[in-house]
Amino acid sequence: MEIQRQLTLKSGGRTRNTFYRRCAVVGFRAGMLAHFLYNEADNNDTRSKVGCFAPCF
C-alpha cells in the first residue's frame, strides 16, 4: 500500500490519486465491517482478525 501511495505522489496524476483514495476508503470500510462483525471487542485477537480481513486497514 505504501508503494502505491508513493507512486501516486510521484506521478501527480489525478486518476491514480482518485483510484488510490477510493481503494483506501474500501479498505477502511471493510475493516469497520469486520470490527462490527467481531462484536466490537477491542483486544489483540480481534485486531489480528480485522487485519487479515482488511489488509489495507
Image (cartoon, rainbow, N blue to C red):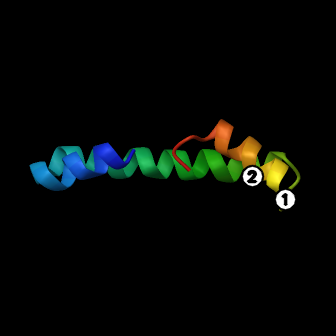
Which quadrant is the N terminus positioned in?
top left
Query: Disc 1 marks which amino acid?
Result: Asn
Q: Quadrant of residue 34?
A: top right
Neighbour tally class for label 1: few under 14, some 14-19, many 20 plus, Cα within 10 Å: few
SS label for mark 2: helix
Do tag 1 and tag 2 residues touch (Cβ < 8 Å)?
A: yes
Residue 54 left/right relative to 26: right
The picture places residue 10, in percent across and down from the top left corner, at 13, 52
Q: Residue furthest bottom?
A: 42
**Count of picture labels:** 2
Residue receiving disc 2? 47
Structural crowding at the residue carrying mark 2, measured as other residues with C-alpha within 10 Å and reported as few (<14), some (14–19) or many (≥20):
some
Q: In this view, does 6 lie to the left or right of 44?
A: left
What x and y, as percent, mark residue 15? Answer: 18, 45
Measured from the top left, where is residue 26 in percent x and y?
50, 45
Alpha carbon of mark 1 to alpha carbon of mark 2: how far? 6 Å
Seen at 36% across and 49% down, the residue is: 2
Q: Position of residue 13 (x, y in %)?
A: 12, 49
Which residue is at the front of the view, 21 or 46? 46
On screen, residue 24 versus residue 41, left or right, reads left
Residue at 56%, 50% (x, y): give it.
57
Residue positioned 24% across, 51% down in the render? 6
Q: Write down the residue under mark 1.
A: 43
> Could you say which is closer to the camera, residue 38 or residue 55?
55
Of the pair 32 and 11, the residue shown nearer to us: 11
Q: What residue type is labelled 2?
A: Arg
For image coordinates 81% across by 50% down, the residue present is 46
SS for dot 1: loop
Query: What number is the disc on residue 31?
Result: none
